[in-house]
Image (spheres, helix red, strand yellow):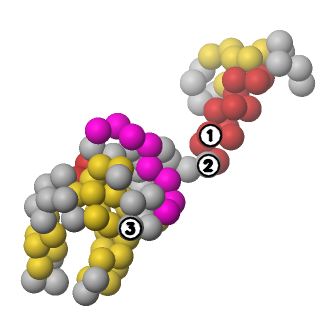
Amino acid sequence: MADDDYVYDEASGEWMAAGDIAARDAADAAGPEVRDAVGNRLSDGDAVVLVKDLTVKGAGQTLKVGTVIKSIRLTGDAQEIDCRHEGIKGLVLRAEFVRKR
């Protein structure tokens, strides 16, 4: 199909350009867009800094403001990131509590 062809999109109920639908589908396949507390886009391997003191359940520890977490991994959820910190296994943080370093 050419980009000037219009196709009926059942998801939105509108006629859309074939190129627009292809671009949207490619973005959906890439996974959710994860943004930090100030709106920066996060990706795998980024380092982040905590913007709030967080009590870690089950670890008996509190992570303080300014703690650097290196090498994060994105999950399938737009609000959660998987990371490691010394002494805490399986740490999952919400993106609203971190800022990209």
Q: Nearer the viewer, mark 3 or mark 1?
A: 3
- Indicate the amino acid at tag 3: Lys
How far apart, in angstroms, are the residues tagged by discs 3 and 1? Answer: 26 Å
The local crowd at label 3, few if under 14, some if 14 to 19, many if 20 or more residues have their Cα within 10 Å, is some
Q: Quadrant of residue 8?
A: top right
- Mark 2 vs 1: CB contact within 8 A: yes
Q: Position of residue 101 (x, y in %)?
A: 35, 52
- Is 84 colored magenta in this rendering? no
Instruction: Give the secondary structure at mark 3.
Output: loop
Q: Which mark is residue 30?
A: 2
Q: Nearer the viewer, mark 2 or mark 3?
A: 3
- Mark 2 vs 3: CB contact within 8 A: no
- Write down the region rendered in magenta: 38-45
Q: Which mark is residue 27?
A: 1
Q: Position of residue 26 (x, y in %)?
A: 68, 40
Question: Residue at (70%, 23%) from the top-left corner?
Answer: 20
Task: Indicate the quadrant containing the N terminus: top left, top right, bottom left or bottom right.
Answer: top right
Q: Is residue 86 above or below residue 43?
A: below
- Indicate the amino acid at tag 1: Ala
- Indicate the amino acid at tag 2: Ala
Residue named by callout 3: 70
Instruction: Give the secondary structure at mark 2.
Output: loop
Q: Quadrant of residue 12?
A: top right
Question: Residue at (35%, 37%) from the top-left corner?
Answer: 39
Q: Is residue 73 above or below residue 6?
A: below
How far apart, in angstroms, are the residues tagged by discs 2 and 3? Answer: 23 Å
Q: Quadrant of residue 40?
A: top left
Q: Position of residue 75 (x, y in %)?
A: 46, 62
Q: Is residue 84 above or below residue 35?
A: below
